[in-house]
Image: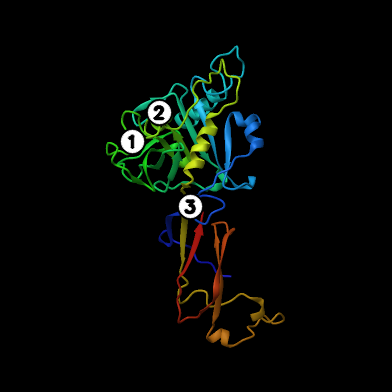
Amino acid sequence: MSFNRLEADDFVVSADSITAGLWKDTQVPAIYTFFTSSTQATGNSGNYYLNVFSNAATSSLEFAVTYGNQAGSGSVAYNTDVDGKSPSSTVFGQYRTLVLGDENASFSFGGITSSDFWAISVERSRYKESLFPGSTTLLLSNGGDTISLTDNSQVVNSVVFNDAGRVFQLVSGSAGNVNTSLNNQGYSTDSGSYGWFLPDIATYILNPRALSNDFADGGIGLDATLTSATSSTTNPNPNLMFVAIKDGAAFSANSQETISSDFVFCRPRSSQFNYSENPSFISGSTGEVLYPLFINSPTTYITTVGLYNDTNELLAVAKLSKPLQKDFTKEALIRVKLDF
């Protein structure tokens, strides 16, 4: 076995961004049919969120829809004697902590502060690292009018960050192409943007005010009359958003992953790696070389490259696709790629 110490210029680090379709049951990054589970919807978790599937099989879970309200409105109170404490207030607090990191902070969509929101959270197994900005097209329908939403990542000059990572505004448009007919921003300044796109946690936060005001036919319904103190019915607001998504019948997005690669360049020089320590070349009784040609004109075949640390511990092994002939008249350059 022969060793050769690697130098600093033998290492090169590269990073590549890989995108892929997001959803489980499609070859393209779009789904057009949406289902919920009646068992989950009528269970305890149905008061907080609805799981959405791309077909009737529960193995095709794609995302979940929920509704949060700071005052606890829009869902059944945990205790009618305690006002403002309900599933919607719990959801609001959870997302405020996750996204804003401050229990006193407010959600501001395009300059308009909102005390409630819908949230769409993509199933974690659908993506490896994050969602790909500029790939979203979400159609929402209220039965008479349809609006297409995307993110404004392709038109902003700088990226805003919060505790959830990158933040982009949800605007009118598709696949990153913004509809600039609305104040050149893709949304009305009176209602604010349609929400936030948070690619690093694969979440969409939707602004009910914009969705209610900017539909030609009256917006998506929102049952704000259900108060935590008076309501005796289950939370309908996640279902209202599910129906809007189902009637819109198209949701597309891509996932994104950054693959870091460490390239190691191994350079067997003409004078190196020309002999073998394989016992089959040596006589077991006399210790002599069995093949005279190996003395005068040695030839070896490189099949494997091992990478060791300074204490001779094997860290990685690379196999060549075919043996590489090596003698005193040949030099080689072997590139080893380590992905992580």
Q: Quadrant of residue 322?
A: bottom right
For marks 1 and 2 on the same chain, the one whose residue lies earlier in the sequence: 1
Q: CA distance from mark 1 to mark 3?
A: 25 Å
Q: CA distance from mark 1 to mark 2?
A: 12 Å
Mark 1 is surrounded, within 10 Å at the Cα level, by few (under 14), some (14 to 19) or many (20 or more) other residues, namely many
Secondary structure under tag 1 reads loop
Q: Is the C-beta separation of discs 1 and 3 under 8 Å?
A: no
Q: Quadrant of residue 207?
A: top left
Q: Nearer the viewer, residue 170 or 156?
A: 170
Residue type at mark 3 is: Pro
Q: Which residue is mark 3?
A: 29
Residue 27 on image: x %, y %: 52, 57
Q: Which residue is mark 1?
A: 187
Is 136 rendered above or below residue 44?
below
> Which residue is at 47% across, 81% downward?
328
> Which residue is at 43% across, 48% downward?
132
Is 262 rendered above or below residue 288?
above
Q: Which residue is mark 2?
A: 209
Secondary structure under tag 2 reads helix
Is 17 rendered above or below residue 318?
above
> Which residue is at 64% across, 81% downward?
281
The answer to whether 266 appears left or right of 178 in the picture is right
Secondary structure under tag 3 reads loop
